[in-house]
Image: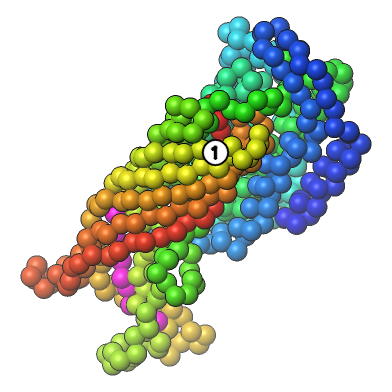
Amino acid sequence: MRVLLFVLFITVVFSVSSSGQRKYSVVQKDTTGVSLKYKDPFWKKTIAPVTLFGLSAISWQKDTDVRSLRNRYVPNFKYRLDDYMQYAPGATAFALKLSGVKGRNKLGRSAITWGGGMLIMGGLVNSIKYSARVMRPDGTTRNSFPSGHTATAFMNATFLHKEYGLVNPLYSILGYSMSTYTGVSRSLNNRHWLSDILAGAGIGILSTELSYLIVDSYYKNKGDFFTEFDAVEEIENPSFVSVKIGQSFYIEATTIERFGLESAIEGAYFFNKRWGIGGEIGFLHMPFENENIEDWDELNEVVDHPYLDVESQGMATLLAGGYYSKFLSRKVIFQSKVQTGIGIGIGGRMDIKGDAKNTVPPVETGVPFLKYDVKNTWVVGCGASVTMMMAPTLGLSLYADYKYADPRIKITVSDYYQDLPEEEKFVDDGHLRVSAMSLGLRLTSFF
């Protein structure tokens, strides 16, 4: 059913876009006094949904890994704010209209378009949910794929973007920030897999775009007050806010067997087209390889194939530094950066695991052994990205970031052995060098 969703989407896109030719209009003054020009066919508006559907398909094999991260770092996260946040971008758009702020369309037409988007989104989400019957991560019901909350949130965020993104791109940033929170919260609440969330976001954006296509065709224009447009000039100052996610790995490793995860919110303010300052708040997760234990006779009497299972290393980062930007063309932007800041270390457990003796089939069992604590440390890094503009203020970036840190680490006996004398709990301390590369995608909103 997930593959069917993607095939259905491609069919709709090409059937709609194949009949439309690339149209140009003269630059005109709208009622707001802003010079506008539009020329993009509908298929260009499907770049973001196609990307999200592709990421959903790629992430299918990583769903359990992402859930293990959630269980590792925030196992008790339970907040219901996402139940309300999914509607917040749409409510913001209607609140602006009722307060007299002029958007793309009048209130009545906006309500029709919003309702059409909700109907399209609800039909797609529910028809797939109850056909695919994917079990939720918390094991409650078989209606996990795709995420309805995320689809609703991104449908409303795209509605806010379409109505007020041309008035001020900060409205778009606000809407997509709220929808991103909804998607992330669905994972943290253990209600959805990562692939559910990515597919839901794609469905939400696609539903709003299709609704606008239908309603605009009925009205024979692109808006009551002003139309969508394509950027005529380069962005003067490429200041931006973005959300990024990627996979990370230790660059010293001779082989890359296990990838980690990096995610961050990043932003920068540019003084001109070339130079700016900015920073990011992010999280870096790096897994360790399990270490086999072959010469511990006492363990071999209890379990078969014993090994040391070390929980992944986590580090929250707060970085700032200088940014450089270069326009390779009107719609392609190269950016680089040098950063430094603080890394907040997150420790973990080191348990002994193996197959329990005399069990058929083998059943894995574990024994608490050690724990490690990571101290806060300085982090330095650099990075580069290439951004393709999908709209006048929205771009999709490929990025590569490097981070280096040398935190102090302390290893002690697990809290499971509370009866041990305090002087016997200490095992070792030293430094654990982190030299990691991250590669991924960044959704970038310029302002």
* Towards the viewer: 270 or 409: 270
Counting every numbered tag in the picture gives 1
Left or right: where 337 falls relative to 63: left
Instruction: Say which residue appears at 66% left-offset and 34% top-offset.
Output: 330
Left or right: where 14 falls relative to 348: right
Alpha-carbon neighbours of circle 1 within 10 Å: few (<14), some, or many (≥20)?
A: some
| Residue 422 visible in the picture | yes
Instruction: Say which residue appears at 48% left-offset and 64% top-offset.
Output: 259
**Amino acid type, mark 1:** Lys
Instruction: Say which residue appears at 72% left-offset and 55% top-offset.
Output: 2
What stretch of residues is rendered in magenta? 344-354
Q: Position of residue 340 (x, y in %)?
A: 32, 45
Describe the element under mark 1 as helix, strand or loop. strand
Q: Position of residue 302 (x, y in %)?
A: 33, 87
Magenta span main SS: strand
**Above or below — where is 145 with respect to 360?**
above
Is residue 333 within the magenta segment? no
Quadrant location of the N terminus in the rendered image: bottom right
Quadrant location of the C terminus in the rendered image: top right
Q: Position of residue 294 (x, y in %)?
A: 34, 90
Dividing the picture into quarters, in which one does residue 276 lie? top left
Instruction: Say which residue appears at 44% left-offset and 75% top-offset.
Output: 254
* Towards the viewer: 163 or 320: 320
| Residue 152 visible in the picture | no
Residue assigned mark 1: 326
Q: Position of residue 398 (x, y in %)?
A: 57, 49
In this view, which residue lies farthest toward the right?
19
Dividing the picture into quarters, in which one does residue 134 lie? bottom right
